[in-house]
Image (spheres, helix red, strand yellow):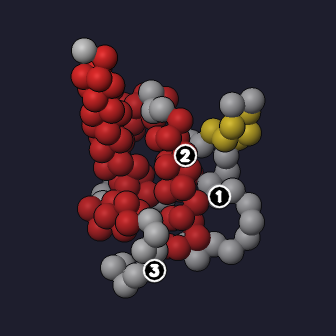
Amino acid sequence: MSNGMIPQFPLFEQLYIQSSEDNISENQQIDLCKQIKGLDDEGHEILFLLIVCYYRIIEKGTDGNIPYFPKIGKLGYRFELQHFPTRLIGMIYKFIPLHYKKMEDEKNRWMDLQT
């Protein structure tokens, strides 16, 4: 994967390398869905990019449609994990704690500036 296919999105490559084809448990999937709901806007945008990049780069998707059968609601796209490839779920599973740490670090920096 590290052949420079996506140099402008190194996070994708990092998550791809760190993930595997192993399934996560049902409890982990439930927790993952809860954590996704708690992401900030930036986290949701990155998550969307991961999904689309996976489809286009790994599965060689070429159509202009949003992959994996999202439902479209008032707040945007809503995906169901059951439609994702196992490797993509693994990538998301690795991404969530990274982004939560980033959110926490930004919150702490903001609080430090306030004092």
Residue drawn at the location 35% of the way across and 48% of the way down: 95
Between circles 1 and 2, the one closer to the viewer is 2
Q: Residues within 10 Å of mark 1 (few under 14, many from 20)?
A: some
What mark, if any, has residue 45 been given in the picture? 2
| Mark 1, secondary structure of its residue | loop
Q: Which mark is residue 5?
A: 3
Q: Is residue 49 above or below residue 45?
A: below
Q: Amino acid at mark 3?
A: Met
Residue at position x 28%, y 29% in the image: 109
Query: Mark 3 or mark 1, which has the lower sequence index?
Result: 3
Q: Nearer the viewer, mark 3 or mark 1?
A: 3
Dot 3 or dot 2, earlier in sequence: 3
Q: Residue at x 67, y 46 (%)?
A: 70
Tag 2, which secondary structure? helix
Quarter of the C terminus within the rendering: top left
Q: Specify the label residue 42 is tagged with.
A: none
The CA span between labels 3 and 2 is 21 Å
Up-down: is 11 above or below 29?
Answer: below
Is 45 on the left-hand or right-hand side of 100? right
Q: Position of residue 27 (x, y in %)?
A: 33, 33
Q: Residues within 10 Å of mark 3 (few under 14, many from 20)?
A: few
Q: Secondary structure at mark 3?
A: loop
Residue at far bottom of view: 3
Q: Is residue 67 above or below residue 32?
A: below
For the residues bearing labels 3 and 1, Cβ distance under 8 angstroms? no
Tell me where residue 113 sits by quadrant.
top left
Residue drawn at point x = 54 percent, y = 64 percent:
53
Disc 3/disc 1 C-alpha distance (Å): 20 Å
Of mark 1 and mark 2, the one earlier in the sequence is 2
Where's the N terminus, which quadrant? bottom left
Residue 33 visible in this rendered orientation of the protein: no
Residue 46 position within the rendered picture, expressed as x and y whole percent measured from the top left = 49, 49
